Image: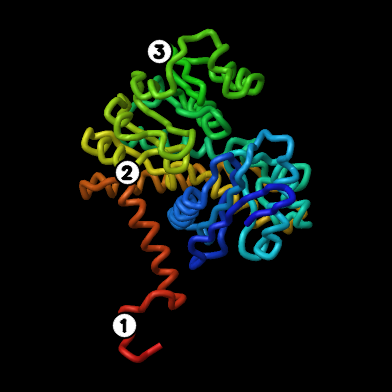
Amino acid sequence: MADRRTGMRGVLVIDNTSRGMGKGGTRMGPHVSVGEISRLARSMTWKWAAVDLFFGGAKAGIVGDPRGHDKEAMLRSFARALSNEVPAEYVFGLDMGLTEADAAILADEIGGRDAAVGLPSALGGLPYDELGITGFGVAEVVDAATDHLGIELKGGRVAIEGFGAVGQAAAQRLVELGAVIVAVSTVHGAVHDPNGLAVDELVHASAEAGDDFVKHVGRPLLATGALAQVEADVLVPAAREDTIDEAMAHRITARLVVEGANMPTTSGARAVLRRRGITVIPDFIANAGGAVAAAHAMDMRHSAFVVDPTSVLETVSAKLRTNAAHVLRHAHDHDGDPREVALALARSRVREAMLQRGHVPRPDWGVGTR
């Protein structure tokens, strides 16, 4: 879709609705493309199925600067362009470049709370980015995976690529679980301290200076790509897609990679890591906490009652830990890859729903039957 008056260009991709209406985050960035949003929509299909929640994969994106002065005009133009699809076929959510305040603008333009999730609490929403629910879930998966693999998380070293909403929340929860955060990175570089970084100080510095904070915290500054070479037990890529390529995969020292971002590891990199014996927990298992929170928010859009974050966090922890343990156990028992195991689980649930709806032929259907 496009609007000549505002210059807005955007895209909505609804991937599969066999298990429910299309639901996935809405992102904004200068290089958003149809291909990128399509990949993310397919990933959402697997994510919903993997956590066994009844929505379909979808994603939306706006081409533009999320820090630009014309952001509100772009958001309102985007919402108007989708007024036939929202909220009947798609509901706006939060992704890169959008905040709770932006979700409020989108909902206001459509004219109802049911048009967006991730709304500010003042509007009766569940502000899951502000609460750090996705990052909390990533940390819970790290804890479950390290326990399964025999890695001691208390005192264990963790490096985090990306220090936005997900990376920060994951770091804070991991510290609560006893881990030591030895390195974090942004697009402007990385900071490293083998004795552990003071995460709360980094969060404060990030709030003050944005991604530039890595230049001002007074600790050794590394190139962002050098994060892979930091001695760590766990690496959490929590930035964006395709940041770990084959070259980086050869340098990673961690025994476990937990994908906090969507699709951060290329297929070639995953093959390298598998050959090296490094376990990778796929994104649609590790970062599904945001989806669980969005499902709660979807359920409460028409309610006058406030969503209780405590119950949401408990559900995120239980679902994500169970999934991670199942995937790792099955992969170990069958000498398989955790991603392929998780994909098989998600695909089987989507296919069963498609079969029940008659979207794919039933095995027992004969020739000429309908």
Outermost bottom residue: 368
Q: What residue type is labelled 1?
A: Asp
Q: Check the picture and name the quadrant holding the N terminus.
A: bottom right
**Which dot marks residue 364?**
1
Q: In which quarter of the image is residue 283?
A: top left
Looking at the rendered structure, the secondary structure element under dot 2 is helix
* Camera-side residue of 50 and 90: 90
Q: Residue at x 72, y 50 (%)?
A: 106
Q: Pick out the residue farthest to the top.
A: 218
Amino acid type, mark 2: Ser
Q: Which of marks 2 and 1 is in front?
A: 2
Q: Let me know if residue 173 appears in the view.
A: no
Q: Of marks 3 and 1, which one's residue comes earlier in the chain?
A: 3
In the image, which disc is placed on residue 267?
A: 2
Q: Can you see residue 32?
A: yes
Which of labels 2 and 3 is toward the front?
2
Q: What kind of colouring is applied to the model shown?
A: rainbow
Q: How far apart are marks 2 and 1 (CA)?
A: 36 Å
Which residue has dot 3 on it?
194
Q: Mark 2: give few (<14), some (14-19) or many (20+) Cα within 10 Å.
A: some
Q: Tell me: 202 left or right of 223.
A: right
Instruction: Specify whether 105 is left or right of 355.
Output: right
Q: What residue type is labelled 3?
A: Pro
Q: Who's the residue at 69% across and 58% down the image?
A: 81
Regarding mark 3 in the picture, which secondary structure is present there? loop
